Image: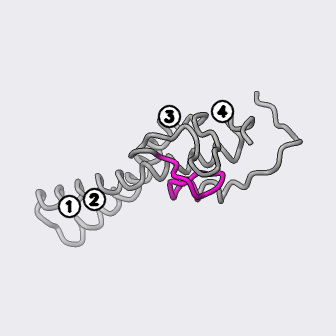
Amino acid sequence: MTETRLDTPFRAVKPAMWNGWRRKCPSCGNGPLLSGYLNVRDACQVCREELHHQRADDGPAYLTILIVGHLMAPLLLIVFEAWRPEPLVLFTIFAIGTVALSLYLLPRLKGAMIGLQWAKRMHGFADSA
């Protein structure tokens, strides 16, 4: 069980997650959070907030699969029932759409998850300034 320190200032969750979604530092909202597609920087270049505490692990991938699956499956059924396209055309369009949406969401969901961890002072973020 983790301790909650009462002498530490409150960190707003929504702005931290929004900054993470934008792939910016959850603390200042200016510095880049990621150094590549999914590599998290050790510290923010602007405010020097340590980011190496993050433990996003497989969470962003699971959320990406959940969101993409819940969007594409009904859409696939609707398109098939409404227009009855050729199977190869249907597969090609939905394969490209699924991959594109997954590639778009994955780094943003990772940033949002890191923002949530920072705001809730999880995994070592409690000790950071």
Give the residue type at disc 1. Answer: Ile
Give the residue type at disc 2. Answer: Gly
- The residue singled out by tag 2 in the image is 97
Q: Which mark is residue 123?
A: 4
Q: Label 3, secondary structure: give it.
A: loop
- The residue singled out by tag 3 in the image is 57
Q: Residue at x 69, y 38 (%)?
A: 125
Q: Nearer the viewer, mark 4 or mark 2?
A: 4
- Asked if the stretch drawn in magenta spans residue 21, the answer is yes
Q: Residue at x 30, y 66 (%)?
A: 78
Left or right, 32 with respect to 29, comes to left
Q: Earlier in the sequence, mark 3 or mark 2?
A: 3
Q: Can you say which quadrant of the picture contains the N terminus?
A: top right
Q: Residue at x 29, y 52 (%)?
A: 99
Left or right, 23 with respect to 94, comes to right
Q: Label 2, secondary structure: give it.
A: helix
Give the residue type at disc 4. Answer: His
Q: Label 1, secondary structure: give it.
A: helix
Q: Quadrant of residue 122?
A: top right
Residue toward you, 26 or 110 = 26
Q: Label 4, secondary structure: give it.
A: loop
Marks 2 and 4: in contact by CB < 8 Å? no
Marks 1 and 2: in contact by CB < 8 Å? yes
Residue toward you, 67 or 124 = 124
Q: How is the image coloured?
A: one colour
Give the residue type at disc 3. Answer: Asp
- The residue singled out by tag 1 in the image is 93
Q: Earlier in the sequence, mark 4 or mark 2?
A: 2
Q: Earlier in the sequence, mark 3 or mark 4?
A: 3
